[in-house]
Amino acid sequence: MKREIVFTSSYSSQLGALISLSKYFKNDLEIHSKYIIIFHISSKGDPKCNYSCFVDYGRIILGSNYQIRVIKINNILKRLVLLFFISSLKIIGLNNYLSIWEPSPNWLKRLFYYKNINLNFFKNYFKNIKFYGDGFLCLSQTSMPFWLDNEKLSNENENNYFKSIFYYFYSLNSYINKKNKYIKIETAYIKNILDKLTLSPKNIRNKKYKNLIIFPLTTFYETNRCSLEAEISLYIDYLNEKINKKVDSLLIKPHPGNLEIKVLLLIKRLKAKNFSILNNDFEKKQILKLPLKIIPLELLCTILVKKMDINEKDIKIALNSNATLSTSYLFPKIKCLKPFGEKLIYKYIKKEFTKKRMVQEEILINKIYKNKK
């Protein structure tokens, strides 16, 4: 009986891991350990590991019989201790007696780089790893999304594992490798779990939000693809084209990796231009238990539809990120606004990143169009 060990980071990634574990336990006929160890790695959006989806929803999704222990890796010292721990497991041969979960190939190894110095003791620490995807269940067979990778755009899987199992809900440009096993998680299965997470004795009673526009932010500035001023100007130009200020209400959905100063500055600029911004309203009424930057877009829309009784047809989402795509699959009646487009991308984004961003936008548009047929 192998013990499950999960390496994870963002809240969205944790939710994807929980859904994958649920599918795994349901479909696999082997007897599984009821004890699950979670290594929660700090992120830019949650440097202290304060938000744990496993603590919040682990037993709801997996069942009360499972014991979940979350270990926070939220400083450099703890990360070094983790490095020595997994290295010791390999040295004494216990690594093959564990069931390991990671978001994507080589994700664990990338934790142990310091200023481009590779601190890893081994090429691989575990074999036959199960992967649960980048972000929320996006099939990822490389260690980094192509639009952030400085290397040439490639679909090639460069992981060093002989055989892997990939759990996923959707994919962008990943190819199918016959040596691996792929398990696609159905829309109905995910929606059933998300509905469980929003069950409560009473729904949230607020004014009806019609013409609600959800605007997910990107990490252009944080990943050095443009300046702070350029990113904010990009958003304002885009929203001026897409938003009807007289009837539309705008909910800014920060990315978990966004700097707070960027979000605050954007909201301030938008209010000065007479956009109707709902963020303060949501915070004052405590509509969400989690901060907007932490809550996955898929769970946010579940709350809007199920708990706040907002009609899907009254919601629009800007197609700025992969999360928009997965949300569209879960809520097909929500309308997606087209992404930034060539004119704005070439105007504001650094030249070396424009081509990859346009490829990403083209993929998103094609996937959305195919889903809406």
Image: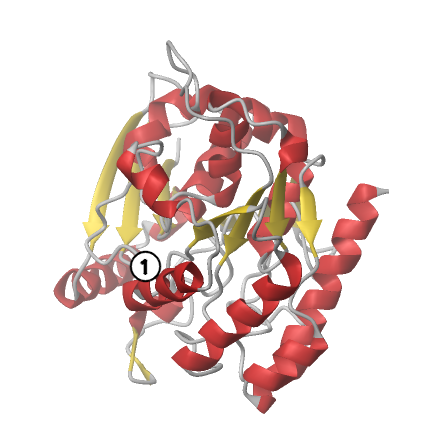
Label 1 neighbour load within 10 Å: few <14, some 14-19, many 20+: some
Residue marked by disc 1: 90
Please provide percent x and percent y for residue 115: 29, 84
Note whether residue 335 is visible: yes
> Please, which residue is most extreme toward the top here?
201
Residue found 73% across the figure and 63% down from its top = 363
Q: Position of residue 372 (x, y in %)?
A: 80, 43
Residue 329, horizontal then vertical, whole percent: 68, 40
Please tell me which residue lies in front, 267 or 130. Answer: 267
Q: Based on the displayed image, in which of its 4 quarters is residue 360 positioned? A: bottom right
Vertical placement of 277 versus 109: above or below?
Answer: above
Query: Which image quarter holds the C terminus?
Result: top right
Tag 1: amino acid:
Lys
Secondary structure at badge 1 equals helix
Residue shown at 81% from the left, 51% from the top: 369
Residue furthest to the bottom in view is 351
Residue 70 figure quarter: top left
Quadrant of image for the N terminus: top left
Q: Position of residue 355 (x, y in %)?
A: 67, 82
Say left or right for 151 vs 267: right
Where 364 falls versus 350 (above or below)?
Answer: above
Can residue 185 be seen by looking at this rendering? no
Between residue 337 and residue 41, name the one nearer to us.
337
